[in-house]
Image (tube, grey):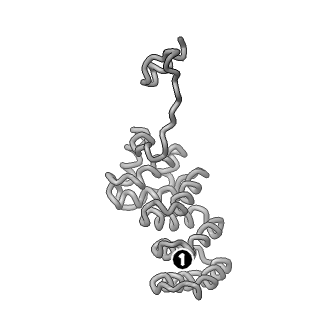
């Protein structure tokens, strides 16, 4: 009887012995941003993202770690204006929660995500993790998407330091695309010790 009550509450209808209940878990593709993001928190995040610049860390800290999946969903929600989507990715770099760095890394490493989201994730990851991001960023210097390689070179350059110089110098002779070579050169200029 309790099982039948749970099935009715879940919207599956009554369960009979002839038709056993099967739990189904929606696939990642079936989950829509609206299903992932709670209403009030989503509304607050959208309010902050509507500002002309990324809101300060204190504003994101106030929303807490629960805003991480909200921002991730907003970054890929095509109904959200592009500028706000990119600010959502940047904001992930300002949320004080380990999940924020992990989310940015997943965004960067997923070739199925839009290039603009991945590029913005590279910059935000560098800002969020500092030198801890070098290993992840370095691996993306070999990404198939030249826009990602370019964004990563710039993100590394902003980090600066000897380790970054070595990474950029190592990659420069291997890069054939002129605009990525230019980004690597710019990164080297920024990384001057």
- Name the residue furthest front: 18
Circle 1 Cα neighbour tier, 10 Å, few/some/many (<14 / 14–19 / ≥20) = many
Which image quadrant for residue 32? top left
Q: Above or below — where is 136 with respect to 187?
A: above
Where residue 111 sits in the image (x, y, percent)?
Answer: 50, 63
Identify the residue at horizontal 49%, vertical 20% (top origin): 19
**Left or right: 38 in relation to 21:** left
Observer-nearest residue: 121 or 115?
A: 115
Observer-nearest residue: 43 or 168?
A: 168
Where residue 91 sits in the image (x, y, percent)?
Answer: 47, 57
Q: Above or below — where is 60 with respect to 35?
A: below
**Left or right: 122 in relation to 50:** right
Observer-nearest residue: 131 or 53?
A: 131
- Name the residue furthest top: 1
Identify the residue at horizontal 46%, vertical 86% (top origin): 178
Observer-nearest residue: 87 or 138?
A: 138
Total marks in image: 1
Kindly state the secondary structure of the residue where label 1 is placed: helix
Q: Above or below — where is 90 with respect to 192?
A: above
Q: Quadrant of the C terminus?
A: bottom right
Identify the residue at horizontal 45%, vertical 83% (top origin): 179
Where residue 119 sits in the image (x, y, percent)?
Answer: 47, 67
Q: Above or below — where is 6 with respect to 105?
A: above
Identify the residue at horizontal 54%, vertical 72% (top origin): 143
**Left or right: 102 in relation to 112:** right
**Pointer 1: what residue?**
153
Where residue 142 sits in the image (x, y, percent)?
Answer: 57, 75
């Amino acid at each position: 009887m309790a099982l039948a009550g749970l099935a009715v509450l879940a919207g599956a209808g009554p369960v009979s012995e002839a038709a056993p209940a099967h739990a189904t878990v929606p696939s990642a593709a079936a989950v829509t941003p609206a299903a992932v993001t709670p209403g009030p928190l989503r509304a607050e995040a959208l309010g902050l993202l509507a500002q002309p610049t990324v809101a300060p860390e204190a504003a994101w800290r106030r929303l807490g770690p629960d805003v991480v999946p909200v921002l991730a969903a907003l970054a890929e929600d095509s109904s959200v204006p592009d500028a706000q989507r990119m600010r959502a990715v940047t904001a992930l770099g300002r949320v004080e929660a380990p999940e924020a760095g992990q989310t940015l890394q997943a965004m960067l490493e997923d070739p199925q995500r839009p290039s603009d989201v991945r590029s913005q994730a590279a910059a935000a990851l560098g800002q969020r993790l500092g030198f801890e991001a070098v290993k992840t960023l370095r691996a993306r210097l070999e990404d198939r998407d030249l826009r990602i390689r370019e964004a990563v070179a710039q993100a590394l350059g902003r980090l600066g330091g000897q380790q970054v110089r070595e990474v950029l110098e190592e990659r420069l002779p291997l890069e054939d695309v002129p605009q990525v070579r230019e980004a690597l050169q710019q990164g080297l200029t920024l990384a001057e010790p």
